[in-house]
Image (cartoon, rainbow, N blue to C red):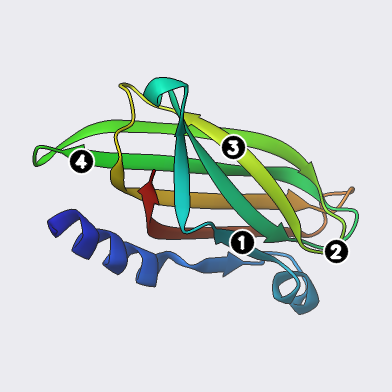
Amino acid sequence: MRIRQLAVGVAAASVVAVAGASPAWAASTASLHIGSSGEIVAKGAAAKVVLNYTCPSGYTGDVSAYLSQVTRSRLTNTGGAGKSITCTGSSQTVTLYVTGTYAWKRGDAVANGYLSACAPDYSNCVNISTSKVITLR
């Protein structure tokens, strides 16, 4: 229960859209959402996590997901995965297979998602992070 409370607090505080040198329209056209559940694959060797994102057309960068899971009242597993992206200006979906230190177990995990993308000349960039508790099935 404590990890769920911590994760909810982190999720509420960590949704960030940083535009830096970006014009206001760039930040407003970027978004990132983590699916509500993940799927344990290959007997726990990885957890499949789905991210939905939108970023300005022509921007390139990457998206990534990190998971943390507690079993028996201890943080016992963490891991991450990422993928290069090219933005279309429309909603896109990416599936990432997150490997951990140990096998993933059924139950809750804290998921952190990140998107970082820039215009071709790097004059404008968008960076977004979000967190939530997901259920690994």
> The disc labelled 3 sits on which kind of residue?
Leu
The residue lying at 79 percent from left, 60 percent from top is 124
Q: Considering only vertical position in the picture, is 96 above or below 123?
A: above
For marks 3 and 4 on the same chain, the one whose residue lies earlier in the sequence: 4
Q: Which residue is disc 1 drawn over?
A: 32
The image quarter containing residue 126 is bottom right
For marks 1 and 4 on the same chain, the one whose residue lies earlier in the sequence: 1
> The disc labelled 4 sits on which kind of residue?
Val
Q: Which residue is disc 3 drawn over?
A: 96
Q: Nearer the viewer, residue 114 or 26?
A: 114
For marks 2 and 3 on the same chain, the one whose residue lies earlier in the sequence: 2
Quadrant into which the N terminus falls: bottom left
Q: Which residue is disc 4 drawn over?
A: 70
Q: Which residue is at the far left?
A: 73
Q: CA distance from mark 2 to mark 4?
A: 37 Å
Q: Which residue is disc 2 drawn over?
A: 89
For marks 1 and 3 on the same chain, the one whose residue lies earlier in the sequence: 1
Q: Residues within 10 Å of mark 1 (few under 14, many from 20)?
A: many
Q: Residues within 10 Å of mark 2 (few under 14, many from 20)?
A: some
Q: Considering only vertical position in the picture, is 17 above or below 53?
A: below
Q: Are marks 2 and 1 in contact (CB under 8 Å)?
A: no
Q: Position of residue 72 (x, y in %)?
A: 9, 37
For marks 2 and 4 on the same chain, the one whose residue lies earlier in the sequence: 4
Q: Is residue 96 left or right of residue 22?
A: left
